[in-house]
Amino acid sequence: MPSSTYYDDATLIVGEQQVDVTADLEAIGPARAREWSGTLHDVPTPLIHQMESGPVRLRLPNGEERRIWPEENTYRHEEETASVPISGDGRPPF
């Protein structure tokens, strides 16, 4: 199965807030039916609960923007930032 990856800067958009994060993403499957998911790094922990109530979007430097959903969270509340697994909607933005 063909795959492609992206590991670089991105902008996490939660409601009206925009935060710079590092995105580690992968798309798997044929070009027309790809699914994509990954992990966002350096997400401020106060935003994680807001991500669960949506809407949440991810914008890459190429201007492509997609809706995302957070997966399970295993972050610790005392940390300032955390890594958040996500699933993406639509065709991969990379």
Image: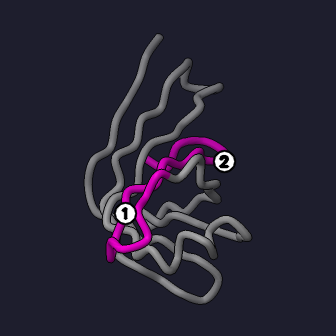
Q: Is residue 61 left or right of residue 69?
A: left
Q: Is 62 placed left or right of 73 in the picture? A: left
Residue at mark 2: 89
Which secondary structure class fits the magenta region best? loop
Q: How many marks?
A: 2
Along the line of sight, the residue nearer the viewer: 70 or 78: 78
Height in image: 58 above or below 28?
below
Mark 2 vs mark 1, foreground winner is 1
Q: Residue at x 60, y 89 (%)?
A: 16
* Real-space CA distance between mark 2 and mark 1, rounded to the nearest whole angstrom: 22 Å
Q: Which mark is residue 82?
A: 1
- Where, by quadrant of the figure, is residue 66 drawn? bottom right
The residue lying at 36 percent from left, 74 percent from top is 78
Q: Residues within 10 Å of mark 1 (few under 14, many from 20)?
A: many
Q: Is residue 13 above or below residue 40?
A: below
Could you tell me residue 31's position as x and y percent? 55, 25
Amino acid found under the numbered disc labelled 2 = Asp
Secondary element at tag 2: loop
